[in-house]
Image (cartoon, grey):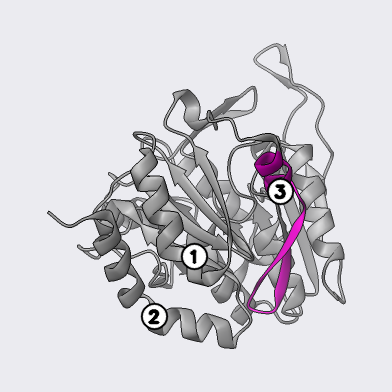
Amino acid sequence: MSTLTELLQAADSHRADLIARLAEEKTTAYRLFHGSAEGRPGLTIDRYGDVLLMQTFHTPLSDDEHAAIVAHYAPLGLLPVYNDRSGANSRIGNRLPPEELEQAQLPRTISEMGVNYHFQARHQGQDPWLFLDLRAGRRRVMQLAAGKSVLNLFAYTGGVGVAAAKAGASFVMNVDFAESSLQVARANAKLNALATRPRCVQSDCFAALRQLSGIGQPKMVRGKKMPPFPELEARQFDVVFLDPPRYAKSPFGVVDLINDYPALFKPALLATAPGGVLICCNNVAQVDREAWLAQLKRSAEKAGRPVREHEWIAPEDDFPSFDGQPPLKMVLLHV
């Protein structure tokens, strides 16, 4: 059985070429060790600028494991921060000494493909402010965005939207329910020289999509008053990026990536301009990608907007998959 240090060495070798390419394009954020595919399930190690972020999701690191990781990456000169998320609801449970916590909470700037983003190793939430496995999706959006209108749904901290604006999009709308996330999205936009500043809309994505798609969001549903929501004019976008969480429930609808992806897919499709592109994400590992794609195509046919072509967007080499079926599935649909 390989030691943790041996697993880290193998991971270094696997991604050496990728890291060299990322350095050339001024990308300072990437995954160094993807434990589920590289021999230690539940452990991830990421570089975010000058921070070495260690996270555990099943069992905490032992003192020896922590020391081995810090020693292995010491030549990189990064600040090690450990977030143990193996408890309930994936919340960070381990306390840091005051001086380490102060460093972990310091605002920092990271870069990806020439785009700057804010980063804090510890903040009020638990997820890092930029999801690294979505880099391939942001890269593809940047290739498509020049002169186009872009809708970024479940935008979180606006990574896709800022990348699109940096690549020359004519109009960008970020939609997310959490104002705290959109505050970071606005700050991310200010970090970059952008010809167009993304519009950030705090809204339940169901309410926003039903209006944008022309379906409409009534203020009363089955005799029940809906919570207030921003009123949006119906419009279609050249590029739509749909990245919902695995499961979420609200008065407006239920996000369920296993059982009911079409509930979101249909209005997102209708908000995509004819001849445009809809990029769909599904991060549930047990969902078979071909079955999921078939479901999307059936939904598109029923909506009268059939898929003309599709293109899989694979996570980059810092997120290896032994079977070619990465947990995060991204498919680009020409509609």
Percent position of residue 30, x then y: 51, 66
- The residue sitting at 49% across, 71% down in the picture is 75
Q: Residue furthest top?
A: 223
Residue wearing tag 1 = 74
Residue wearing tag 3 = 103
Q: Which mark is residue 16?
A: 2
Viewer-side residue, 137 vs 276 = 137
Viewer-side residue, 199 vs 6 = 6
Circle nearer the viewer, 3 or 1: 1
Left or right relative to 225: residue 271:
left
Does label 2 or label 3 sit earlier along the sequence? 2
Image quadrant in which you'd find residue 286: top left
Left or right relative to 172: residue 96:
left
Percent position of residue 8, x then y: 32, 63
| Residue 319 visible to the viewer | yes
Residue 281, placed above or below residue 88:
below
Residue 224, placed above or below residue 79:
above
Tell me where the magenta segment starts and ends, as one range: 99-117
Viewer-side residue, 247 vs 326 = 326
Looking at the rendered structure, the kind of residue marked 1 is: Ala
